[in-house]
Image (cartoon, rainbow, N blue to C red):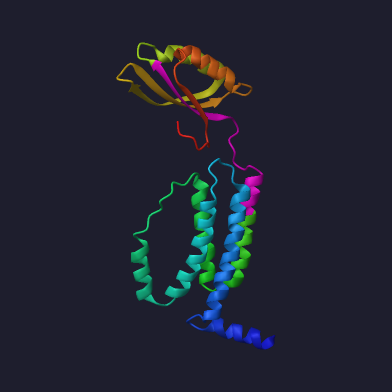
Amino acid sequence: MNEFITSLKDYISLDTPHPLEVVGAMFLSFVLNLFIATLYRNTYKGTRYTQDFVHTLIIIGTITTILIMVVRGNAGVAFGMFAAFSMIRFRRNLGQARDLGFVFFAMAAGMVVGARLYTESLICVPLVAGLIYVLSRTDAFAPRRATHLLTMRMTSDMDFEDRLNPIWADCVDRADLTSVRSAQAGMMTELRYGLQLKDGVKVSDLIERLQLACGNNRIVLTPTGSELDV
């Protein structure tokens, strides 16, 4: 056993990693990224969860470890890989901003292992994962009031301010008009608002009043944070 530990230390002390160390680093990176992928799955709150993205997290983290170990101390190889990877583009639109954070998390784990900082990787990855889990389970920084994005249409002859201002006074604390545009060859006006509902106001009651105001034309009310497009 002592001889194995001594040999392992000798491998790690080498400038060029031994093949056995590379295999061990890949396995460690794979396990850590499995842990990150499990955290992502257990804390995901959206509606566009895909197995493909979770597999991608694991692959990115593990491959990053290999790359870091290969380019270590070799400027020529590093420059060639940078040129090659600069041509790669993501082909998938990320469903949530936090997805990008998990991509960087997986890459960071792979980099730390690839830099042969094995003890640091075993400390930092679980620590960061624990903090992310606590933020998710406590629903930290959630909005205090329900907020929505409203898209609605009225005929061009309607005065939307006169029709909507009484509704805003009764149902919302804040209504921000974000855009006004014509639709259907100028016959309709499409309005977009950011709304913050008052306490106790039901969405169904708000929609009913909006339908009366716009003459039963198109209405889309989307909670902020939703992945649906309005």
Q: Quarter holding the C terminus?
A: top left
Look at the picture and state if 81 lies above or below 140: below
Which sits in the foreground, 102 or 63? 63
| Residue at image coords 33%, 20% | 184
Residue 71 position (above or below residue 102):
below
Quarter of the picture holding the N terminus: bottom right
Q: Nearer the viewer, residue 174 or 12?
A: 12
**Is 148 one of the magenta-colored residues?**
yes
Residue at the spot 56% in from the left edge and 16% down from the top edge: 170
Q: As drawn, which residue projects farthest toward the right?
A: 1
Q: How many marks?
A: 0
Q: Residue at x 55, y 19 (%)?
A: 206
**In the rendering, at what x and y percent does residue 203 appear?**
58, 22
Q: In the displayed image of the protein, which residue is found farthest to the front?
A: 51
Name the outermost residue toward the bottom: 3
Q: Viewer-proximal residue, 27 or 105?
A: 27
- Measured as percent of width and height from the top left, residue 77 is found at 37, 74
Residue at the spot x=47%, y=81% of the render?
A: 16
- Residue 4 point in image, percent of width and height: 65, 85
Return the residue nearer the eye: 18 or 147.
Answer: 18
In the picture, residue 138 is in which quadrant?
top right
User: Would you place residue 17 above or below residue 38 in this image?
Assistant: below
- Position of 8 compared to 79: left or right? right
Q: Quadrant of residue 152?
A: top left
Q: Which residues are magenta?
A: 131-154
Q: Is residue 223 magenta?
A: no
